């Protein structure tokens, strides 16, 4: 398993490099060929999405389980030179090892185990790996939703939470707005009053936007990027802010959207344009999600593992499937820390139980 994880990590696959992602998809296809019927789907400007219909024991199969993952990472090609795949003191390190190439390897070995033990799996099992999850899933969302609607459960191979490997039964919805202000340029020294500063107007708007945060409701609003103006001696004609939003409940998304659309300029000489919106709906802890977690918890106890659950502000493709009402259990991949960071790593002593849990979930 460590060898396979190493091969996966060393096949770098950043979202914005279609050829690199396709090379990784080809590697996964070669690995899956003995145990699955394979199909790839164009991702447009992104790499190909992979669909693998698993060949698992059992003749009388009813319905489908969707195992969901992604082939892309946040790390550019060449990262391995300064951040190589390595085994050190009970962990393996490398770009994308936690998020989420180890989870893909776990699933492959779970399927192999079921075949080698000839254990009948009661459902059809489809593995879907998307090529654009790290950049919003624009190309893959429709495919994910289509396959989720055909499934009675979705198992997401994203990493667990923390070094305990807590499963994720709630994720916030994620979105982004761009607020663009247009004012009137003038010479800051000669003709100051003739100008209408878009930068000043944007600063006032950001203060208003910051007030949209409601921590008690799980709503956060962050103006993370601002830009504007041309020179210090010119009253700025244009400025913009890129704003991240997170909502714990879908019912809070529309009112928040309306607040952005209702922004009015303090200076009537300025105009405001707002674009964007919610990208991923929240994964809410519904009764269906709770039941799936409790089933997983019972199966983990048989392995001597006390499973816990968690919520997170980050999104995954499981957000889309849960929003359709399909029971979705996230965080079933590797246990480790440092996703998207230089110390990204997984715990070697949690490889076996996570793989066994995936196999038991498919059986159950």
Image (cartoon, grey):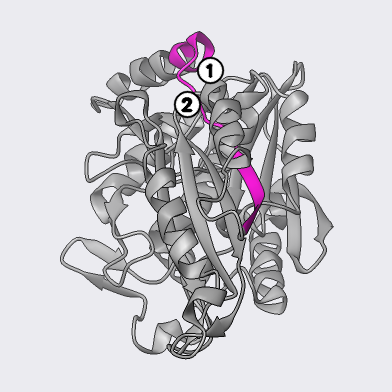
Seen from the viewer's position, the closer of residues 293 and 10 is 293
Count residues near mark 2 (Cα–Cα under 10 Å), then give few for <14, some for 14-19, many for 20+.
some
Q: Is residue 86 left or right of residue 256?
A: left
Please provide percent x and percent y for residue 144. Answer: 72, 39
Please provide percent x and percent y for residue 299. Answer: 38, 20
Check if mark 1's residue and mark 2's residue have beta carbons within 8 Å.
yes
Which residue does the image show at 69% across and 22% down from the upper left?
A: 123
Task: Give the CA separation, mark 1 to mark 2.
Answer: 6 Å
Seen from the viewer's position, the closer of residues 41 and 53 is 41
Q: Is residue 261 left or right of residue 75?
A: right
- Above or below — where is 304 with respect to 351? above
Which residue does the image show at 55% across and 35% down from the upper left?
A: 259
Residue corresponding to mark 1: 364
Which residue does the image show at 75% across and 19% down from the upper left?
A: 63
Residue corresponding to mark 2: 360
Seen from the viewer's position, the closer of residues 93 and 76 is 76
Magenta run includes residue 299 = no
Q: Is residue 254 left or right of residue 172?
A: right
Seen from the viewer's position, the closer of residues 290 and 66 is 290
Please provide percent x and percent y for residue 118. Answer: 60, 31
Give residue 160's quadrant in the image. top left
Count residues near mark 1 (Cα–Cα under 10 Å), then give few for <14, some for 14-19, many for 20+.
few
Please say whether residue 102 is visible from this viewpoint: no
What segment is highlighted magenta in the picture? Answer: 271-291
Q: Quadrant of the N terminus?
A: bottom left
Please provide percent x and percent y for residue 149. Answer: 76, 25
Instruction: For mark 2, give the secondary structure.
Output: helix
Instruction: For mark 1, give the secondary structure.
Output: loop
Give the residue at the far left of this rendering.
Answer: 89
Which residue does the image show at 40% across and 33% down from the upper left?
A: 219
Magenta run includes residue 275 = yes
């Amino acid at each position: 398993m460590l060898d396979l994880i190493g091969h996966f990590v060393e096949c770098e696959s950043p979202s914005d490099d279609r050829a690199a992602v396709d090379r990784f998809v080809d590697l996964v296809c070669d690995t899956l060929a003995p145990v699955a019927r394979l199909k790839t789907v164009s991702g447009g400007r992104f790499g190909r999405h992979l669909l693998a219909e698993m060949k698992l024991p059992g003749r009388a199969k009813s319905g489908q389980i969707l195992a969901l993952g992604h082939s892309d990472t946040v790390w550019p090609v060449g990262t391995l030179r300064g951040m190589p795949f390595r085994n050190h003191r009970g962990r393996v390190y490398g770009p994308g090892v936690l998020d989420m190439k180890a989870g893909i390897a776990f699933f492959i070995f779970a399927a192999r185990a079921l075949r080698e033990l000839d254990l009948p799996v009661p459902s059809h099992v489809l593995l879907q790996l998307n090529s654009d999850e790290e950049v919003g899933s624009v190309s893959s969302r429709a495919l994910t939703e289509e396959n989720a609607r055909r499934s009675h459960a979705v198992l997401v191979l994203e990493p667990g939470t923390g070094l305990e490997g807590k499963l994720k039964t709630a994720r916030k919805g994620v979105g982004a707005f761009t607020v663009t202000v247009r004012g009137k340029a003038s010479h800051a020294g000669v003709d100051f009053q003739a100008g209408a500063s878009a930068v000043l107007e944007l600063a006032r708007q950001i203060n208003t936007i910051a007030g949209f945060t409601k921590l008690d409701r799980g709503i956060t609003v962050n103006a993370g990027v601002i830009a504007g103006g041309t020179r210090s001696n010119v009253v700025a004609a244009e400025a913009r802010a890129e704003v991240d939003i997170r909502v714990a409940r879908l019912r809070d998304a529309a009112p928040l959207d309306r607040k952005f659309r209702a922004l009015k300029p303090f200076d009537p000489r300025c105009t405001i344009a707002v674009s964007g919106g919610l990208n991923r709906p929240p994964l809410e802890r519904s009764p269906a999600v709770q039941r799936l977690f409790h089933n997983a918890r019972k199966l983990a106890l048989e392995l001597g593992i006390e499973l816990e659950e968690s919520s997170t502000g980050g999104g995954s493709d499981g957000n889309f499937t849960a929003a359709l009402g399909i029971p979705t259990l996230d965080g079933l991949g590797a246990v480790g820390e440092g996703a998207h960071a230089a110390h990204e790593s997984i715990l070697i002593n949690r490889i076996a139980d996570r793989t066994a849990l995936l196999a038991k979930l498919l059986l159950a």
